[in-house]
């Protein structure tokens, strides 16, 4: 079968790699892809911000299955357009994707369906902001309502800073485009966990859990990024907690969306905070996470194509997934200056030596071929993933591989999976 993957980042490289392991797959096309994906899939250009151009590629390629990686094509209604043409596609509709594309919708949805989350307020104006702030204690979390590529969340240590941040979101100075709605949220303390499930509109099937590292600096310092690394280990969420998260979060979301006539098919990403009051939802994503996918999919031993097709056909309750019990660690190598301004077109060397390290996969996030050389083409450039018998051993392998890679300005965190290591290799259960 022929598969089309929409997207061009590290998540899509991991998807292409996992899908390519299926004996059923004869060809993979990726739009637009990147310099690394081009080694195993045929890459075709596309404007991911333009629905008509996305559909142009779909109609030209006529794939047997399309897998949508990023959030923007989902929010534009790519799945809706394909379903109208009776084409097989994995991902939620535009209405269902509101769980990610609108933070206000997600918070109000959780309130309607009694899903545990932080206290919040939705502000449409400066006047509403002043009134809402009176009901919060610092620190306060400020969230842009719309999609912001992982950079629309600001933790403000004071009410004054929260007030200024919201105004900057309203006038567009903070994110580049003005927001019409901004969410204020209670600050939650605890440990974050990314809990992902496949969904077919009625049933859920959990993936192994992961933990993302959003801040740019070691020790979780500095501004938020799209993700500087992740790790996945069975110790993050044990069987009892997994069942609780399905019963109290994932399944109520799928049931609630069905009742609201927006059935959710695809990947539901539940960003959880494990607080002293119990697990609470920080955010939903309507697709595979990045870089969590680069940590999770290397552990998958089942056929990913079969699982995605079961989701499309409404029969997830009839299948199960097999996983490698080894933990994985993924470290992102970024361009110097990211998440602020950075330069591209830096030559990348050492990839062959890095992939020669036992148990290591290198996924390309922001690379391209130029004049016969592989060069940087984004803020997050590479994601180096390693599997091993322990989290510490996986870390050692990932960082050994990273030391073999070079491009000017290359930066990466040196403490990915630090929480698991503090728990004696992740042995402590939540």
Image (tube, helix red, strand yellow):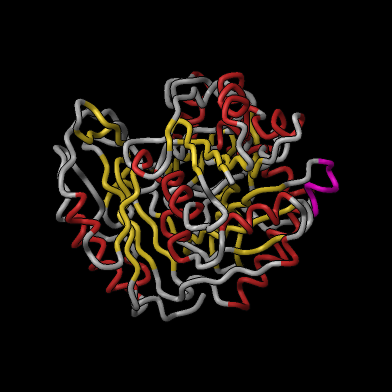
Q: How many marks?
A: 0
Q: Nearer the viewer, residue 47 or 411?
A: 47
Q: Position of residue 363 (x, y in %)?
A: 34, 49
Q: Is residue 76 visible?
A: yes
In this rendering, position of residue 387 left or right of residue 107: left
- Image position of 251 with respect to 168: above or below: below
At 52% across and 36% down in the image, what residue appears? 6
Q: Nearer the viewer, residue 424 or 269?
A: 269
Specify start and end residues of the magenta stretch as a single range: 255-261
At 67% across and 52% down in the image, what residue appears? 309
At 74% across and 49% down in the image, what residue appears? 111
At 66% across and 37% down in the image, what residue appears? 104
In this rendering, position of residue 313 left or right of residue 63: right
Main structural element of the magenta stretch: helix, strand or loop? helix
- Res 303 quadrant in image: bottom right
- Res 79 quadrant in image: top right
Q: Position of residue 180 (x, y in %)?
A: 61, 23
Q: Position of residue 350 (x, y in %)?
A: 16, 49
In this rendering, position of residue 381 left or right of residue 284: left
Q: Is residue 130 visible?
A: no
- Res 417 quadrant in image: bottom left
Residue 107 part of the magenta segment: no
Q: Position of residue 86 (x, y in %)?
A: 76, 34
Q: Nearer the viewer, residue 154 or 388?
A: 388
């Amino acid at each position: 079968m022929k598969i089309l993957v929409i997207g061009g980042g590290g998540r899509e490289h991991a998807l292409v790699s996992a899908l390519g392991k299926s004996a059923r797959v004869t060809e993979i096309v990726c739009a637009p892809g990147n310099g690394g994906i081009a080694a195993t899939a045929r890459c075709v250009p596309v404007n991911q911000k333009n629905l008509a151009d996305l559909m142009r590629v779909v109609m030209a390629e006529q794939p047997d299955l399309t897998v949508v990686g990023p959030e923007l094509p989902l929010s534009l209604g790519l799945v809706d357009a394909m379903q109208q043409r009776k084409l097989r596609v994995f991902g939620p509709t535009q209405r269902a994707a509101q769980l990610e594309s609108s933070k206000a919708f997600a918070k109000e949805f959780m309130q309607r369906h009694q899903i545990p989350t932080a206290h919040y307020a939705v502000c449409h104006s400066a006047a509403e902001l002043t009134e809402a702030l009176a009901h919060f204690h610092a620190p306060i979390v400020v969230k842009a309502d719309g999609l912001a590529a992982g950079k629309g969340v600001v933790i403000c240590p004071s009410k004054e800073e929260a007030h200024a941040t919201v105004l900057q979101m309203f006038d567009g100075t903070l994110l580049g485009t003005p927001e019409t709605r901004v969410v204020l949220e209670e600050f939650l303390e605890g440990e974050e966990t990314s809990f992902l499930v496949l969904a077919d509109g009625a049933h859920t099937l959990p993936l192994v859990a992961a933990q993302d590292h959003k801040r740019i600096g070691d020790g979780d310092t500095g501004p938020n990024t799209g993700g500087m690394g992740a790790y996945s280990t069975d110790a993050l969420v044990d069987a009892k907690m997994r069942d609780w998260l399905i019963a109290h979060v994932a399944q109520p979301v799928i049931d609630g969306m069905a009742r609201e006539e927006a059935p959710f098919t695809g990947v539901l990403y539940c960003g959880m905070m494990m607080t002293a009051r119990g697990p609470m939802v920080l955010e939903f994503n309507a697709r595979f996470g990045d870089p969590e996918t680069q940590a999770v999919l290397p552990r998958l031993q089942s056929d990913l194509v079969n699982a995605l097709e079961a989701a499309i056909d409404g029969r997830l309750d009839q299948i199960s997934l097999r996983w490698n019990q080894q933990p994985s660690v993924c470290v992102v190598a970024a361009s110097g200056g990211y998440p602020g301004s950075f330069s591209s077109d830096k030559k990348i060397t050492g990839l062959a030596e890095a992939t020669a390290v036992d148990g290591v996969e290198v996924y390309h996030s922001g690379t391209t071929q130029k004049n016969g050389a592989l060069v940087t083409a984004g803020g997050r450039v590479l994601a180096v993933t390693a599997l091993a018998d322990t989290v510490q051993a996986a870390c050692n392998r990932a960082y050994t591989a990273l030391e073999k890679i070079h491009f000017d300005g290359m930066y990466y965190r040196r403490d990915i999976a630090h929480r698991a290591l503090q728990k004696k290799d992740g042995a402590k259960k939540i």
